[in-house]
């Protein structure tokens, strides 16, 4: 019985380790993508919307990023609610 418990603990540790590594890698790539989009959005605003005005560019950027964050959070929340409803059925 002891050997089986050790095997289960090792197997559980490996599984949790793998899940954590996948989450970290995904978060890392997400951060890199966010930073890339950050530069694109800044350049677009500076070039086409508020060229020459640093404060206005930053304000527009902050508002745009906030709106996108709220929208994405809303959509993800709806997806989680739908998933919860599907699991209850």
Image (cartoon, rainbow, N blue to C red):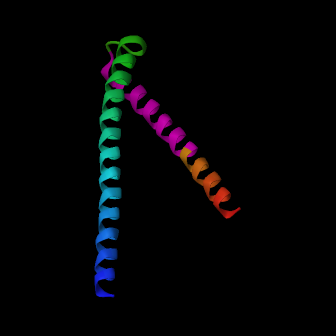
At 39% from the left edge and 19% from the top edge, which residue is drawn?
A: 45
Compared to 50, does 34 lie above or below? below
When the figure is inspected, residue 29 is found, relative to residue 7, above or below; the finding is above
Viewport quadrant of the N terminus: bottom left
Q: Magenta segment: does it hold 9?
A: no
Residue at the limit of the structure toward the bottom, as seen here:
1
Q: Is residue 37 above or below residue 7?
A: above
Could you tell me which quadrant the C terminus lies in? bottom right
Magenta span dominant secondary structure: helix
Q: Residue furthest right?
A: 89
As displayed, is residue 26 above or below residue 17? above
Look at the image and give the residue range highlighted in magenta. 53-75
Q: In this view of the protein, which residue sits in the foreground, 21 or 74?
A: 21
Residue displayed at 36% across by 12% down: 47
Name which quarter of the figure residue 31 lies in: top left
User: Which quarter of the figure has residue 19?
Assistant: bottom left
Most foreground residue, 35 or 29: 29
Nearer the observer, 20 or 42: 20
Where does the image place residue 60, in percent across and percent down from the top left?
42, 26
Q: Kindly identify the residue that appears in the image at 35 percent across and 51 percent down.
A: 23
Residue 62 lies in the magenta stretch: yes
Q: Nearer the viewer, residue 43 or 75?
A: 75
Position in image of residue 40 (x %, y %): 35, 22
Relative image position of residue 72 (x, y in whole percent): 51, 40
Measured from the top left, where is residue 57 in percent x and y? 36, 22
């Amino acid at each position: 019985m002891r050997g089986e418990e050790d095997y289960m603990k090792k197997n559980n540790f490996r599984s949790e380790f793998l899940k954590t590594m996948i989450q970290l890698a995904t978060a890392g790539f997400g951060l890199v993508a966010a930073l890339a989009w950050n530069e694109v959005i800044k350049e677009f605003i500076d070039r086409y919307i508020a060229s020459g005005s640093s404060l206005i560019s930053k304000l527009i950027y902050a508002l745009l990023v906030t709106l996108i964050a709220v929208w994405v959070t809303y959509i993800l929340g709806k997806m989680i609610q739908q998933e919860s409803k599907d699991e209850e059925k």
